[in-house]
Image: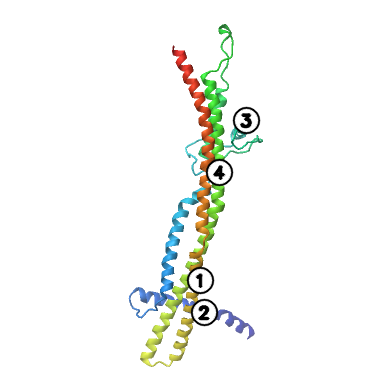
Amino acid sequence: MDHLKQWTASVAPLSQKLSERFGTLNQQAREHFGQANDLTELPEEYKQLEQRVDALKSAHQAMMHTIKVYETETYDYPHHLQESVTQGAQSIGHTLSQWASQATRNTSLPQVQPTSAPPTHPRTLNHAIARSATAAAMDLGKCPQQVPAYMGGEPVTTTESKLAELLQKFAVAEDAVGHSRLAQDKAILSQFIAVWNAFGSQIQLAMKARQQVRDARLYLDGWRGHLKSAEASSSSKLDTYRLEVEQAEDKLVSATEEAISLMKTVLDNPEPVKSLASFVKAQLEFHRSAAQTLEQLDNDMTAVVTSVEADFRASRD
């Protein structure tokens, strides 16, 4: 007997939930087919908050649809490149590190310390260009830098050596720009995407609370319909129906207050605005760093280009 009582006590709440759910679905169907009248009107404040949260939810989805690309390192990496980053990455990465260390000495650029050979190299477009330029410079470095003995055997600066020199500087610059881009992405991940993911969860809580309001309103109107029919037929269940309506009204009020509170919390949250400013700052820092690196490269290249053009004109005289 005790087991039967325990079983009954545990099943009762489930039975009540199923009954409420059935009543809600039944009312929803009646409204869908235009068979329900005198629907409960929700507060104007609630309806305005719904509109504002809907707009914010759409804005959140629109932003995250594109900004989430920063979660993937290879978002600008050309898929058609048939290169293996693991093959030769150690030697190329170590070579770039040595070159960068030499290039930043006695300059205003951030100093780079040579590192041990990395096991991999990042898959970004800038890093891919840096690897190509490094390989090209190393190939040109194999060219002989002296004229034959019958011509004096004196070492000369050739077009290949100048191109190799520029490719070396170019590789270092592209590698630095690539690392700046990765720093930008890391900042965006922590200061924007993580914040907006949390904000999205907050929106979902408000949406769930709104669904509770919708269900409570449907449940209340369903019982009001039963009460109206009972009143018309002088049913003996009038008192039972009135009690159900009162309980449903209390439930709707409670659900509405909870939803209003959660929607206001979403709308008052300053984090989306702050994180958007952080996003712009991360981009600004990246472009500043890239511009500084490329300006230095442009100055170095201009001098070499002038020298190459002068040598070319002299060889044609």
Q: Distance between the residues labelled 2 and 4?
A: 56 Å
Q: Nearer the viewer, mark 3 or mark 4?
A: 3
Q: Are marks 2 and 3 in contact (CB under 8 Å)?
A: no
Provide the residue designation for mark 2: 15
Q: Distance between the residues labelled 3 and 4?
A: 22 Å
The residue at the point 51 percent across, 34 percent down is 295
The label on residue 261 is 1
Give above or below for 21 relative to 148.
below
Provide the residue designation for mark 3: 102
Which quadrant does the N terminus fall into?
bottom right
Q: Do the residues labelled 1 and 3 touch (CB within 8 Å)?
A: no
Q: Nearer the viewer, mark 2 or mark 3?
A: 3
Name the colour scheme: rainbow
Which quadrant does the C terminus fall into?
top left
Q: Sequence order check: which comes first, mark 2 or mark 3?
A: 2
Q: How far apart are marks 2 and 3 (CA)?
A: 77 Å
Q: What element carries label 4?
A: helix
Mark 4 residue type: Leu
Q: How far apart are marks 1 and 2 (CA)?
A: 30 Å
